[in-house]
Structure formats: C-alpha cells, structure tokens
Image: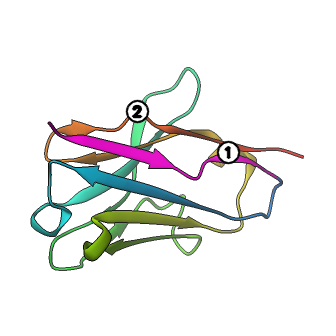
Amino acid sequence: QVQLVESGGGLVQPGGSLRLSCAASGILFSFNTVSWYRQASGKQRNLVARITTDGSTYYADSVKGRFTISRDYAKNTVYLQMVSLKPEDTAVYYCYSDSYWGRGTQVTVSS
C-alpha cells in the first residue's frame, strides 16, 4: 500500500520560513519524480515544484528563488524549503508521485 505523508505545515508570519516534508511508504522516490502542488481555498491545484530522479528541478515562477525542493533517498523523503513566505503562499500543500497523492498539509501565511 502506497502512502505519501506530508508534514511541516503551520501558521507563519509574512517573511517567515517553513520546511515541508513528504515521507513515502510503498514507493521508492529514487525511482520516481516527486512533485509538490498547492491548492488555495476555492482555487485549482497547481504545481509548485518538482524533482526528477536525476535531480533536475522545476519551480513555478511564483516561487522561484524562494522555494527549494530536495530529497533524501535514505529516508525516502522529499522536502520543500520555503523562505520569504507571502500571504499568497497560503494553501494546502500536496505531495504527488507516480499517480499517488498525499492528504496535504496546511500552510497559512498571515500576520
């Protein structure tokens, strides 16, 4: 049974930082591209960042220079380091890999 479990979300002030984690079981991230998506209330789910098996990364324009995706194969975990957070980054963040979704973690950026 495949499970992707996100963690690390929370409430942070504008300009703050958070690190999200996506831990997997039943699937090896070393063999799969892993993506982070986010969905703000009432809006569609959008791709935020992606890392491929060869380490190539992609970032949405809205997060370039502020978010960094990385992986730890030994822990079978992918991270999303987020700095200089803005209120518009508020959303539920989801991990996705090989057609599987996690349940998401809420990130709220507010003063």
Q: Position of residue 91 (x, y in %)?
A: 59, 38
The residue depicted at 18 percent of the width and 61 percent of the height is 33
Of the residues tagged 1 and 2, which is closer to the observer?
A: 2
Q: Quadrant of the N terminus?
A: top left
Q: Give, as a three-letter code, the residue at label 2.
A: Arg
The residue depicted at 51 percent of the width and 69 percent of the height is 64
Helix, strand or loop at label 1? It is helix
* Disc number placed over residue 103 in the picture, else none: 2
Front-most of residues 105 and 42: 105
Q: Give, as a three-letter code, the residue at label 1.
A: Glu
For the residues labelled 1 and 2, the Cα–Cα distance comes to: 21 Å
The residue depicted at 59 percent of the width and 70 percent of the height is 66
| Span colored in magenta | 1-12
Q: Classify mark 2: residues with Cα within 10 Å, few (<14), some (14-19) or many (20+).
A: some
* Disc number placed over residue 19 in the picture, else none: none
The extreme top residue here reads: 42
Q: Is residue 15 left or right of residue 75?
A: right
Is residue 8 within the magenta segment? yes
Q: Position of residue 21 (x, y in %)?
A: 46, 58
Say which residue label 1 marks.
Answer: 88
Q: Is residue 12 above or below residue 69?
A: above
Mark 1 near mark 2, Cβ–Cβ under 8 Å? Answer: no
